[in-house]
Amino acid sequence: MRMPYSNSGRCVVFFLLTFILVPVAMAATSSDLPYTLYYNGSIYTVDDNQKWAQAFAVDMETGIILKVGSDDEVEQYILDQNHKCNPGELCPVQTNIKAVANVVNLRGRLVLPGFQDAHLHVIEAGINSELCYIPEDSLLEDIPFIMDDCKDGGRFGDQGWILGAGIDIGFLFDSLQDIYQEYPISVLDKAFGGTPVFILDSLGHGGIANSKAMELVGYDKLSRNENPVGGVLDRDPVTGELTGIVLENAQQMFRSAAFPPTRANKEKAYESLLDALDILALNGITTVSDAGGFWKQAANSDVWEVAEQQNKLTVRASNAFYIYPDMDIQEQLSKLTQQYRNGSDSLVRFNQAKIYVDGILALGTSALLDPYVYDSNDYGFEYFPDGKLEEVADILSNAGFQLHLHATGDRGVRMALDVLESDKIDPSSGPHRLTHNYLVHEQDRSRFAELDVVADFQLSPSSFDTTYRNFLKSDILGNGRTEQLMPAIEIHNEGGLVTLSSDWDADELSPLKKISTALQMVRPSGNTFDLDSVIRMMTINPAILLQHNDRTGSIEVGKYADFVVLDTNIFSSEVDIFGIDPAKIAKTKVLATCLQGEPVYDPLPILGYESIGKASPPENENSGGMQGNQAKTFLLLLNIALVYIASVW
């Protein structure tokens, strides 16, 4: 007969657990030592006075970098700081670095300043991931069935709306002409009756709605030729009836009605923000500029402030407020000045005004100097017609807001530059910027440098997709203008300050994919980017734009320790600056992300405090054998197994 386990057997297990678990727990415990020494690294500082270093020291109380240099220089600096004594005091010389500093062996890995993404939609990305997803190529008649399969039938928020996201408005327009006998509004009416429905497109510039949604926002009462300011309501060309398709600012009424700033909705927005922050940290992003700013909705500045108060932020944020073209600017200003925040000590600032000049090329809403291919009388669309753009920009810049202008077409870019050239604009709240800049006339490219206007581009892989480019050539712009798209290199070569952002979640987030794409750009002139310039466009350049380059954007003394550790040295001899393999850069992984000296992403972990040992060879994450982090993972799994055995006994 099998005998039950004795208490002495359990004691043996817990004795073993003590020897295995305690060291692991101790290694994970944060230290009270005043400094952290990061050494044995390949540190690309983006500091023109010292581009490369082996080590740097961080003050753990402030998160500020104290010293950058060689291993020996930085170690000696820390020891010297600890040896400062008052006159007449007997002060022993400290030679053991571990006694005064946390020590992190970077094992030869590449360290860069934290990536800064100056144009993305953080809370929207989190919220959109929770909405019912409708694939871009979905047929209109299939949308109700897709919605039925989603959680709660697609209901989201506390107002009883059915919400979705992901459709391709351009595809729907084409399908209406070629396939469908019904408009989206009637399909949604039949499927959902009196429940309001709104489905966003994949690019954030339009959507489709049913009759109940139209009624709730008052669009059913507009006359046949009437559109909301800054928006377009698509109508049947014969009857004038609404088709259910809405473009540009016309969508904002639905968003505000479906997701107002109630307590429950704010809690949902807060959870969405936390989810998005995790993704940002995983991608090595330490600074963002949230370009959504729809302050009438639940996803407003309050949500960011709560995250900062709860110590949940993994990024610095310099965010924008959306300026509604259909609302009086003075009324908006009175509300926005109450929410304006620009304190240098805060992780979160709301100091920008997001002003749309035009729409996007794919929907024919970009403002062009020459007409669209499909219609010789169509020159695009303006959010603020009749001179209102200059009035709005004047008022906001003089109220202290940094101007964040959305412009995609060459006419839209010229309009924005003309406004910023005006004497009425206050330059002290700048630098102001234009984002997107899909099409910029040759005569306007030098104006960015002349006017000290930042050119913000999104050079994602999708921007250079062959199918998309062919569509623009055949249906939108023609060959000549399509070849001139995204003149980031030309503006950079003219002396303009260029930043590279993602526009997430409309486009890919990964900074490393953007680096890869930018390095593959070849302009009609044959010009290309170099790696140093591209990295600057995602570190120090956006720091200049976001008015904190004195505190971030490079790894140098006096700045915050915001940095990222990569698994591949994209500057190494295998992938050097003269023979870069863009595909390899796109596959490079972020191993750890630090904000102000504190890890916000370090899953292995690699930033655990180690004993100093300068003879240690650089660790290859892909090499065979159980080393460093692999050993830690093994011990963790062993611990879990032993705890399980002990619980069974």
Image: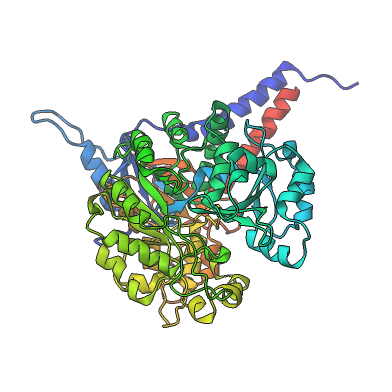
The spot of residue 416 in percent (x, y) is: 36, 61
The spot of residue 500 in percent (x, y) is: 42, 61
Q: Quadrant of residue 253?
A: top right
Instruction: Specify whether 82 is left or right of 304.
Output: left
Instruction: Specify whether 464 is left or right of 93.
Output: right
Name the residue rendered at 51%, 72% in the picture.
581
Name the residue rendered at 37%, 54% in the picture.
388
412 or 36, nearer to the observer: 412
Does 247 appear above or below 491? above
Confirm whether residue 498 shows in the render. Answer: no
Name the residue rendered at 78%, 53% in the picture.
142
Q: Residue furthest left?
A: 88
Confirm whether residue 97 shows in the render. Answer: yes
Q: Quadrant of residue 18?
A: top right
594 or 458, nearer to the observer: 458
90 or 354, nearer to the observer: 354
Name the residue rendered at 42%, 29% in the picture.
309
Does 471 appear above or below 31? below
Quadrant placement of the N terminus:
top right
Quadrant placement of the C terminus:
top right
How many tags in the picture?
0
The spot of residue 646 in percent (x, y) is: 70, 25
The spot of residue 228 in percent (x, y) is: 52, 49
- The figure's colour scheme reads rainbow
Q: Residue furthest right?
A: 1
